[in-house]
Image: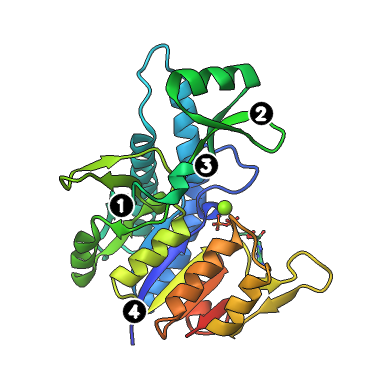
Protein backbone atom coordinates (compact mmCIF):
# COMPACT_ATOMS: atom_id res chain seq x y z
CA UNK A 1 0.00 0.00 0.00
CA UNK A 2 1.35 3.41 -0.94
CA UNK A 3 1.98 5.76 1.96
CA UNK A 4 1.73 9.54 2.10
CA UNK A 5 5.28 10.62 2.91
CA UNK A 6 6.78 14.00 3.72
CA UNK A 7 10.45 13.82 2.70
CA UNK A 8 12.55 16.55 4.29
CA UNK A 9 15.95 16.91 2.63
CA UNK A 10 18.90 18.35 4.52
CA UNK A 11 21.39 20.84 3.21
CA UNK A 12 23.78 18.17 1.93
CA UNK A 13 21.19 17.00 -0.60
CA UNK A 14 21.98 20.24 -2.45
CA UNK A 15 25.37 21.44 -1.24
CA UNK A 16 27.92 19.52 0.81
CA UNK A 17 30.38 20.93 3.35
CA UNK A 18 33.46 22.27 1.59
CA UNK A 19 31.68 22.84 -1.72
CA UNK A 20 31.57 26.49 -2.81
CA UNK A 21 28.16 26.40 -4.48
CA UNK A 22 28.85 26.34 -8.22
CA UNK A 23 25.62 25.65 -10.06
CA UNK A 24 26.79 22.42 -11.70
CA UNK A 25 27.98 21.02 -8.36
CA UNK A 26 24.62 21.77 -6.73
CA UNK A 27 22.86 20.29 -9.73
CA UNK A 28 24.92 17.08 -9.50
CA UNK A 29 23.97 16.74 -5.82
CA UNK A 30 20.31 17.31 -6.66
CA UNK A 31 20.47 14.71 -9.45
CA UNK A 32 21.84 12.16 -6.97
CA UNK A 33 19.13 13.09 -4.41
CA UNK A 34 16.45 12.77 -7.08
CA UNK A 35 17.42 9.17 -7.82
CA UNK A 36 16.84 8.32 -4.17
CA UNK A 37 13.49 10.13 -4.18
CA UNK A 38 12.52 8.34 -7.42
CA UNK A 39 12.98 4.95 -5.69
CA UNK A 40 10.39 5.99 -3.12
CA UNK A 41 7.99 7.31 -5.76
CA UNK A 42 8.43 4.23 -7.96
CA UNK A 43 7.60 2.01 -4.97
CA UNK A 44 4.14 3.59 -5.09
CA UNK A 45 4.33 6.20 -2.33
CA UNK A 46 2.86 9.71 -2.51
CA UNK A 47 5.67 12.11 -1.77
CA UNK A 48 5.91 15.77 -0.88
CA UNK A 49 9.42 17.18 -0.68
CA UNK A 50 10.68 19.80 1.77
CA UNK A 51 14.27 21.04 1.54
CA UNK A 52 16.76 23.23 3.37
CA UNK A 53 18.14 26.47 1.86
CA UNK A 54 20.67 27.79 4.41
CA UNK A 55 23.77 28.04 2.18
CA UNK A 56 21.75 29.22 -0.85
CA UNK A 57 19.87 32.01 0.91
CA UNK A 58 23.16 33.05 2.57
CA UNK A 59 24.82 33.38 -0.84
CA UNK A 60 21.93 35.35 -2.33
CA UNK A 61 22.10 37.70 0.64
CA UNK A 62 25.86 38.08 0.14
CA UNK A 63 25.39 38.85 -3.58
CA UNK A 64 22.91 41.54 -2.57
CA UNK A 65 25.33 43.02 -0.04
CA UNK A 66 28.24 43.07 -2.49
CA UNK A 67 26.22 44.64 -5.31
CA UNK A 68 24.37 47.24 -3.25
CA UNK A 69 26.14 50.23 -4.85
CA UNK A 70 24.54 49.25 -8.19
CA UNK A 71 21.47 47.11 -7.45
CA UNK A 72 19.00 47.73 -4.62
CA UNK A 73 19.24 45.21 -1.78
CA UNK A 74 16.28 42.83 -1.58
CA UNK A 75 14.92 41.89 1.84
CA UNK A 76 15.42 38.46 3.40
CA UNK A 77 11.96 37.06 2.52
CA UNK A 78 12.63 37.92 -1.14
CA UNK A 79 16.03 36.17 -0.94
CA UNK A 80 14.30 33.18 0.58
CA UNK A 81 11.78 33.13 -2.28
CA UNK A 82 14.64 33.32 -4.80
CA UNK A 83 16.30 30.32 -3.19
CA UNK A 84 13.04 28.32 -3.20
CA UNK A 85 12.67 29.18 -6.86
CA UNK A 86 16.06 28.08 -8.07
CA UNK A 87 16.32 25.03 -5.83
CA UNK A 88 12.81 24.09 -7.00
CA UNK A 89 13.94 24.47 -10.60
CA UNK A 90 16.97 22.20 -10.05
CA UNK A 91 14.75 19.60 -8.39
CA UNK A 92 12.01 19.78 -11.02
CA UNK A 93 14.55 19.28 -13.80
CA UNK A 94 16.30 16.38 -12.06
CA UNK A 95 13.06 14.69 -10.97
CA UNK A 96 11.45 15.08 -14.38
CA UNK A 97 14.51 13.39 -15.92
CA UNK A 98 14.15 10.33 -13.67
CA UNK A 99 10.34 10.33 -13.50
CA UNK A 100 9.26 11.52 -16.98
CA UNK A 101 5.64 10.47 -16.48
CA UNK A 102 5.20 12.30 -13.20
CA UNK A 103 3.80 15.82 -12.87
CA UNK A 104 6.38 17.70 -10.78
CA UNK A 105 5.87 21.22 -9.46
CA UNK A 106 7.33 23.60 -6.92
CA UNK A 107 5.01 25.63 -4.75
CA UNK A 108 6.61 28.84 -3.51
CA UNK A 109 5.52 28.55 0.08
CA UNK A 110 4.95 31.08 2.83
CA UNK A 111 4.95 29.96 6.45
CA UNK A 112 2.99 32.04 8.89
CA UNK A 113 4.66 32.82 12.19
CA UNK A 114 3.34 34.61 15.26
CA UNK A 115 4.60 38.23 15.43
CA UNK A 116 4.56 37.79 19.23
CA UNK A 117 6.67 34.62 19.06
CA UNK A 118 9.21 35.09 21.82
CA UNK A 119 11.98 34.22 19.31
CA UNK A 120 11.60 37.78 17.95
CA UNK A 121 12.70 39.25 21.26
CA UNK A 122 16.00 37.37 21.23
CA UNK A 123 17.18 36.59 17.66
CA UNK A 124 19.71 33.74 17.55
CA UNK A 125 20.26 32.80 13.90
CA UNK A 126 23.34 34.42 12.26
CA UNK A 127 22.87 35.31 8.58
CA UNK A 128 24.82 37.12 5.84
CA UNK A 129 28.23 38.76 5.97
CA UNK A 130 30.69 39.22 8.80
CA UNK A 131 31.39 42.74 10.09
CA UNK A 132 33.89 44.38 12.42
CA UNK A 133 32.72 45.63 15.80
CA UNK A 134 32.61 49.27 14.53
CA UNK A 135 30.62 48.35 11.42
CA UNK A 136 28.35 46.25 13.58
CA UNK A 137 27.63 49.17 15.94
CA UNK A 138 26.80 51.36 12.94
CA UNK A 139 24.34 48.79 11.55
CA UNK A 140 22.59 48.58 14.90
CA UNK A 141 22.22 52.39 14.89
CA UNK A 142 21.35 52.88 11.19
CA UNK A 143 19.32 49.80 10.31
CA UNK A 144 18.13 48.68 13.73
CA UNK A 145 19.62 45.23 13.13
CA UNK A 146 20.38 42.93 16.03
CA UNK A 147 24.05 41.96 15.75
CA UNK A 148 26.01 39.28 17.50
CA UNK A 149 29.49 37.83 17.65
CA UNK A 150 29.66 34.55 15.68
CA UNK A 151 32.10 31.97 17.04
CA UNK A 152 35.12 34.31 17.04
CA UNK A 153 34.76 35.02 13.30
CA UNK A 154 33.30 38.52 13.52
CA UNK A 155 29.90 40.16 13.93
CA UNK A 156 26.84 39.08 11.96
CA UNK A 157 23.22 40.03 11.74
CA UNK A 158 21.02 37.87 13.96
CA UNK A 159 17.45 37.06 13.01
CA UNK A 160 14.75 35.20 14.90
CA UNK A 161 13.91 31.56 14.33
CA UNK A 162 10.20 31.49 15.22
CA UNK A 163 7.90 28.46 15.29
CA UNK A 164 5.90 27.76 12.13
CA UNK A 165 2.20 28.36 12.85
CA UNK A 166 0.65 27.53 9.49
CA UNK A 167 1.70 26.70 5.93
CA UNK A 168 -0.17 29.34 3.91
CA UNK A 169 -0.38 27.30 0.67
CA UNK A 170 -1.33 24.02 2.38
CA UNK A 171 -4.60 23.62 0.47
CA UNK A 172 -2.81 24.09 -2.85
CA UNK A 173 -0.28 21.43 -1.83
CA UNK A 174 -3.03 19.02 -0.76
CA UNK A 175 -4.95 19.57 -3.98
CA UNK A 176 -1.87 18.88 -6.08
CA UNK A 177 -1.04 15.76 -4.06
CA UNK A 178 -4.58 14.47 -4.49
CA UNK A 179 -4.03 14.66 -8.26
CA UNK A 180 -0.84 12.61 -7.99
CA UNK A 181 1.57 15.53 -8.42
CA UNK A 182 5.03 15.30 -6.94
CA UNK A 183 5.22 18.56 -4.99
CA UNK A 184 8.28 20.45 -3.78
CA UNK A 185 7.27 22.93 -1.09
CA UNK A 186 8.13 24.75 2.12
CA UNK A 187 11.76 25.15 1.00
CA UNK A 188 14.00 26.47 3.76
CA UNK A 189 11.06 26.08 6.14
CA UNK A 190 8.99 28.50 4.07
CA UNK A 191 9.13 32.26 3.54
CA UNK A 192 8.32 33.71 6.98
CA UNK A 193 5.23 35.93 7.01
CA UNK A 194 3.12 37.49 9.75
CA UNK A 195 -0.57 38.36 9.62
CA UNK A 196 -1.75 41.75 10.89
CA UNK A 197 -5.02 42.59 12.66
CA UNK A 198 -6.70 43.00 9.25
CA UNK A 199 -5.57 39.54 8.08
CA UNK A 200 -2.94 40.98 5.74
CA UNK A 201 0.27 38.98 5.27
CA UNK A 202 3.74 40.48 5.08
CA UNK A 203 7.22 38.98 4.98
CA UNK A 204 9.54 39.27 7.96
CA UNK A 205 13.29 38.86 8.40
CA UNK A 206 13.45 35.48 10.09
CA UNK A 207 14.60 31.94 9.41
CA UNK A 208 12.27 29.04 10.17
CA UNK A 209 13.77 25.65 10.99
CA UNK A 210 13.00 23.37 8.02
CA UNK A 211 12.49 20.33 10.27
CA UNK A 212 9.82 22.20 12.28
CA UNK A 213 8.09 23.28 9.07
CA UNK A 214 8.26 19.73 7.71
CA UNK A 215 6.51 18.59 10.89
CA UNK A 216 3.83 21.28 10.46
CA UNK A 217 3.31 20.27 6.82
CA UNK A 218 3.25 16.54 7.58
CA UNK A 219 0.49 17.08 10.14
CA UNK A 220 -1.46 19.40 7.85
CA UNK A 221 -1.43 17.02 4.87
CA UNK A 222 -2.13 14.10 7.23
CA UNK A 223 1.03 12.26 6.15
CA UNK A 224 1.50 8.63 7.19
CA UNK A 225 5.24 9.07 7.58
CA UNK A 226 7.60 11.97 8.24
CA UNK A 227 11.06 11.19 6.83
CA UNK A 228 14.01 13.43 7.53
CA UNK A 229 16.87 12.66 5.17
CA UNK A 230 20.28 13.86 6.32
CA UNK A 231 23.99 12.99 6.16
CA UNK A 232 24.10 10.29 8.86
CA UNK A 233 22.66 6.80 8.42
CA UNK A 234 21.23 6.73 11.95
CA UNK A 235 20.69 8.77 15.05
CA UNK A 236 23.12 7.92 17.85
CA UNK A 237 23.22 8.24 21.58
CA UNK A 238 26.57 9.41 22.95
CA UNK A 239 27.21 10.69 19.43
CA UNK A 240 30.89 11.15 18.59
CA UNK A 241 32.07 9.42 21.76
CA UNK A 242 33.73 5.99 21.99
CA UNK A 243 30.52 4.53 23.44
CA UNK A 244 28.22 5.92 20.72
CA UNK A 245 25.34 3.63 19.92
CA UNK A 246 23.23 3.67 16.79
CA UNK A 247 19.44 3.73 17.24
CA UNK A 248 17.18 1.71 14.94
CA UNK A 249 13.68 1.69 16.38
CA UNK A 250 12.49 3.45 19.53
CA UNK A 251 9.27 4.49 21.22
CA UNK A 252 8.19 8.09 21.71
CA UNK A 253 8.96 7.75 25.45
CA UNK A 254 12.46 6.39 24.85
CA UNK A 255 13.19 9.07 22.25
CA UNK A 256 11.95 11.77 24.64
CA UNK A 257 14.14 10.48 27.47
CA UNK A 258 17.24 10.54 25.24
CA UNK A 259 16.23 14.01 24.04
CA UNK A 260 15.89 15.25 27.64
CA UNK A 261 19.28 13.72 28.48
CA UNK A 262 20.85 15.95 25.78
CA UNK A 263 21.91 13.30 23.23
CA UNK A 264 20.80 15.37 20.23
CA UNK A 265 22.57 18.69 19.55
CA UNK A 266 20.68 21.98 19.23
CA UNK A 267 20.55 23.20 15.67
CA UNK A 268 21.27 19.80 14.06
CA UNK A 269 19.83 16.54 15.41
CA UNK A 270 17.82 18.23 18.19
CA UNK A 271 15.14 19.80 15.95
CA UNK A 272 14.95 16.62 13.86
CA UNK A 273 14.30 14.41 16.87
CA UNK A 274 11.86 16.95 18.33
CA UNK A 275 9.90 16.87 15.05
CA UNK A 276 9.96 13.05 14.95
CA UNK A 277 8.77 12.71 18.54
CA UNK A 278 5.92 15.17 17.95
CA UNK A 279 4.89 13.41 14.72
CA UNK A 280 5.09 9.89 16.22
CA UNK A 281 2.82 10.96 19.11
CA UNK A 282 -0.04 10.75 16.61
CA UNK A 283 0.46 6.98 16.58
CA UNK A 284 2.54 7.18 13.42
CA UNK A 285 6.15 6.56 12.41
CA UNK A 286 8.85 9.17 11.86
CA UNK A 287 12.19 8.30 10.31
CA UNK A 288 15.66 9.85 10.24
CA UNK A 289 18.08 8.28 7.77
CA UNK A 290 20.64 9.07 5.13
CA UNK A 291 19.51 10.32 1.77
CA UNK A 292 20.60 7.14 -0.01
CA UNK A 293 18.63 4.87 2.30
CA UNK A 294 15.21 6.51 1.85
CA UNK A 295 13.31 3.51 0.46
CA UNK A 296 15.11 0.97 2.66
CA UNK A 297 14.29 3.06 5.74
CA UNK A 298 10.65 3.38 4.70
CA UNK A 299 10.53 -0.41 4.45
CA UNK A 300 12.06 -0.72 7.93
CA UNK A 301 15.50 -1.89 6.83
CA UNK A 302 17.59 1.23 7.54
CA UNK A 303 17.69 4.45 9.51
CA UNK A 304 16.24 5.36 12.90
CA UNK A 305 12.49 5.05 13.45
CA UNK A 306 10.49 6.74 16.19
CA UNK A 307 7.29 4.73 16.53
CA UNK A 308 4.16 6.04 18.17
P1 LIG B 1 20.71 18.80 7.72
O1 LIG B 1 21.45 19.73 6.84
O2 LIG B 1 20.39 17.48 7.08
O3 LIG B 1 19.55 19.42 8.43
P2 LIG B 1 22.33 18.93 10.14
O4 LIG B 1 23.79 19.16 9.93
O5 LIG B 1 21.51 20.03 10.63
O6 LIG B 1 21.78 18.32 8.80
O7 LIG B 1 22.12 17.67 11.11
C1 LIG B 1 22.77 16.43 10.86
C2 LIG B 1 24.00 16.33 11.76
O8 LIG B 1 23.60 16.18 13.11
C3 LIG B 1 24.89 15.14 11.54
O9 LIG B 1 25.81 15.35 10.48
C4 LIG B 1 25.62 15.04 12.90
O10 LIG B 1 26.87 15.65 12.83
C5 LIG B 1 24.76 15.84 13.85
N1 LIG B 1 24.33 15.14 15.07
C6 LIG B 1 24.22 15.75 16.26
N2 LIG B 1 23.81 14.90 17.20
C7 LIG B 1 23.64 13.70 16.59
C8 LIG B 1 23.22 12.42 17.05
N3 LIG B 1 22.89 12.21 18.32
N4 LIG B 1 23.17 11.40 16.16
C9 LIG B 1 23.50 11.62 14.86
N5 LIG B 1 23.91 12.81 14.38
C10 LIG B 1 23.99 13.85 15.22
MG1 LIG C 1 22.76 21.20 7.84
Q: Earlier in the sequence, mark 1 or mark 2?
A: 1
Side of 157 relative to 93 (left or right): right
Discs 4, 3 touching: Cβ within 8 Å: no
Identity of the residue drawn at 53% across and 65% down: 272
Q: Earlier in the sequence, mark 1 or mark 4?
A: 4
Camera sees residue 251: no
Side of 179 relative to 158 (left or right): left
Q: Is residue 243 above or below residue 25?
A: below
Q: Is residue 225 above or below residue 68?
A: below
Identity of the residue drawn at 53% across and 85% down: 300
Identity of the residue drawn at 26% across and 40% down: 202
Identity of the residue drawn at 40% across and 51% down: 117
Q: CA distance from mark 4 to mark 2?
A: 49 Å
Q: Earlier in the sequence, mark 4 or mark 3?
A: 4
Q: Which residue is mark 3?
A: 55
Residue mark closest to the camera, 4 vs 3: 3
- Give the image location of residue 47, x and y in percent: 34, 69
Q: Which residue is mark 4?
A: 44
Q: Secondary structure at mark 4?
A: loop
Amino acid sequence: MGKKVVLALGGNAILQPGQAGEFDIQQANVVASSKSIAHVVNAGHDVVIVHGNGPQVGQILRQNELAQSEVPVQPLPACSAESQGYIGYMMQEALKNVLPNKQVATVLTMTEVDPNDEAFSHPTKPIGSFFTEEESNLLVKEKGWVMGEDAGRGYRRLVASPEPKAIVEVDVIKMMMSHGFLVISTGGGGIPVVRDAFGQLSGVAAVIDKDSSALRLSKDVDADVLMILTDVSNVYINYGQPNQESLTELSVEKAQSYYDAGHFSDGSMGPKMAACIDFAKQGKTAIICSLNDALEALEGRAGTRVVG
